[in-house]
Image (tube, rainbow, N blue to C red):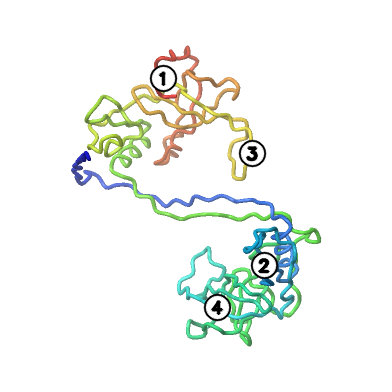
Amino acid sequence: MTFRKIVVDITSPDKPVLSASLTPSFDYTRSTGPVLGAFFTGLRDRRIVGTRDSRGTVHVPPVEFDPHTRAPLTQTAEVGSGDGVGGVVVAWTWVPDPTDVNPLDTPFAWALVRFDGADTAMLLALAADGPEAVSTGMRVRVRWSAERRGDVHDIACVVPEGYDDDNIAATDAPPTDGEPAAVEPGAAEPVSGVVTPIGLAVTHTAAPAESEFLRAIVQGRVLGRRRSNGPEVYVPPRDYCPSDGVAMGEYIEVADTGTVTTFGIVNVPFAGQQITPPYVTAYILLDGSDVPIQHLVLGCEASEVRMGMRVRAVWAPEADRPASMKAITHFEPTGDPDADPATYAKHL
């Protein structure tokens, strides 16, 4: 057996590294089908609907296939409706410091609740005066949302039986006058699709080389870095070579012009899209670099973009230039003759 030893000498950066808060998110849209559609339609109408499997087990939330026979489940089972829907806490955990993505803005418990008539439990927010007021086996009842649209948020939370509703501080807390909550227009139709926002809040800390790259790009310069063990220049620069783990060498400023190597045309619209299709996203080999970067190619018809096309960076105004690749808004054709295929063949 052969072993290869790689020694990496980590030195402190001369300048502080950069960091930024990032919140990547998108709306996941899916059709419900008949089983989940019945469940979400029931929630909109203040009803809890599950499914019954071949052994008589009632699943809430419903499952689409029998866990024993794997056959599709078609038999629904309603376990309660209106303000009287109740159940038992199977397990719980206390949340002392809610965030802006939590359903309640005051401390609460996440609880697994088994509704009366159901054999499985559902995860719901439990509003209570404190962790001492929550216990496994306690009785709770549903608190419906003020406006219902056919998703899990139609249940604002559950509360202990006998709990004073005026104490609930839900973000979308329903009215407390006993009147049924409002239903979205067009709610007479069964729910056939749901939109689930998905997001993540993180703090990204840039490595020293990435920090140098970001500082340069704010100045309108593109910075790369040469390998210690070879002539290749990486853009964006790396701290250590991905092929041998050795610390990278000198920084190299490369041109903001380059060659389209490969590309794709985006024809399908999607939620949050900022550019009207069709448009092109391409890998661009900058002059002086040996690693293509991905960016937009605009300034011409999408059908005109081709491999070998020469393009130039279009920079955001200096006063509005962020420390990110958005400092370059896009690339556009230079009008120069196409590059020789041999110059970018190994980058396809």
Report the Cα–Cα distance between label 1 and label 4. Answer: 62 Å
Cβ–Cβ below 8 Å for labels 2 and 1?
no
Circle 4 or circle 2, nearest the eye: 4
Q: Nearer the viewer, residue 29 or 346?
A: 346
Which mark identifies residue 344? 1
Q: Residue furthest bottom?
A: 162
Q: Residues within 10 Å of mark 4 (few under 14, many from 20)?
A: some
- SS of the residue under disc 2: helix
Residue 102 image position (x, y, % from top left)? 53, 66
Circle 2 or circle 1, nearest the eye: 1
Among numbered discs 1 and 3, the one appearing first in the sequence: 3
Circle 4 or circle 3, nearest the eye: 4
Among numbered discs 1 and 4, the one appearing first in the sequence: 4
Q: Which residue is mark 2?
A: 154
Give the residue type at disc 1.
Answer: Tyr
Report the Cα–Cα distance between label 4 and label 2. Answer: 21 Å
Give the residue type at disc 2.
Answer: Asp
Circle 1 or circle 4, nearest the eye: 4
Cβ–Cβ below 8 Å for labels 4 and 2?
no
Among numbered discs 2 and 3, the one appearing first in the sequence: 2
